[in-house]
């Protein structure tokens, strides 16, 4: 511990803040598990197709929302989506 660290943690409150920050920082990099050891399962073609369809749906929705002329129209469109309306193409 350096002199600078000691002077920064002179009060009990500063010491508590230091301990909380150390705890939130997580484990040291050398103790972290290797990512190579955990193999991610391959997604099936149906999962990939579903993900693609969802991305397309999101793009259509965002494009429809982006066509709003002002904030009031955007809010009206968002309310319509909340009620279950489909974006107009």
Image (cartoon, rainbow, N blue to C red):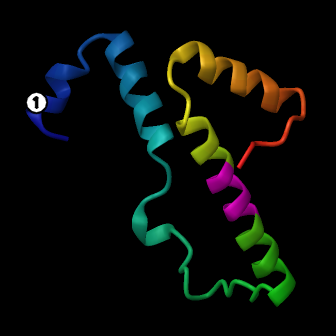
- Residue drawn at x 50%, y 24% as measured from the top left: 69
Give above or below for 1 relative to 60. above
Viewer-side residue, 40 vs 87: 87
Q: Quick check: 22 above or below 70?
A: below
Foreground of the two, 53 or 68: 68
Could you tell me what secondary structure mostly forms the magenta stretch? helix
Position in image of residue 28 (x %, y %): 42, 60
Residue 1 visible within the image: yes
Question: Residue 85's spot in the image, x, y percent?
Answer: 86, 35
Q: Position of residue 86 (x, y in %)?
A: 83, 42
Horizontal side of residue 61 vs 25, given as left or right: right
Which residue is rendered at x = 15% and y = 21% of the image? 7
**Quarter of the rendering containing residue 57:** bottom right
Is 54 displayed left or right of 22 in the figure?
A: right
Q: Is residue 38 left or right of residue 71?
A: right
Q: Is residue 55 magenta?
A: yes
Specify the farthest residue to the left: 3
Q: Give above or below for 11 relative to 19.
A: above
Classify 10 Å Cα crowding around label 1: few (below 14), some (14-19), many (20 and above): few
The number of callouts visible is 1
Where residue 70 appears, x then y in whole percent? Answer: 50, 18
Q: Is residue 89 above or below residue 1?
A: below
Image quadrant where one finds the N terminus: top left
Residue bounds of the magenta highlight: 54-60
Residue holding disc 1: 4
């Amino acid at each position: 511990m350096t002199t600078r660290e000691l002077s920064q943690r002179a009060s009990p409150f500063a010491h508590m803040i230091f301990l909380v920050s150390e705890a939130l920082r997580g484990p040291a990099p050398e103790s972290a598990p290797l990512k190579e050891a955990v193999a991610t399962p391959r997604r099936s073609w149906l999962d990939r197709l579903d993900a693609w369809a969802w991305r397309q749906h999101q793009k259509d929705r965002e494009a429809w929302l982006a066509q709003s002329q002002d904030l009031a129209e955007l809010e009206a469109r968002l309310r319509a989506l909340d009620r279950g309306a489909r974006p107009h193409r």
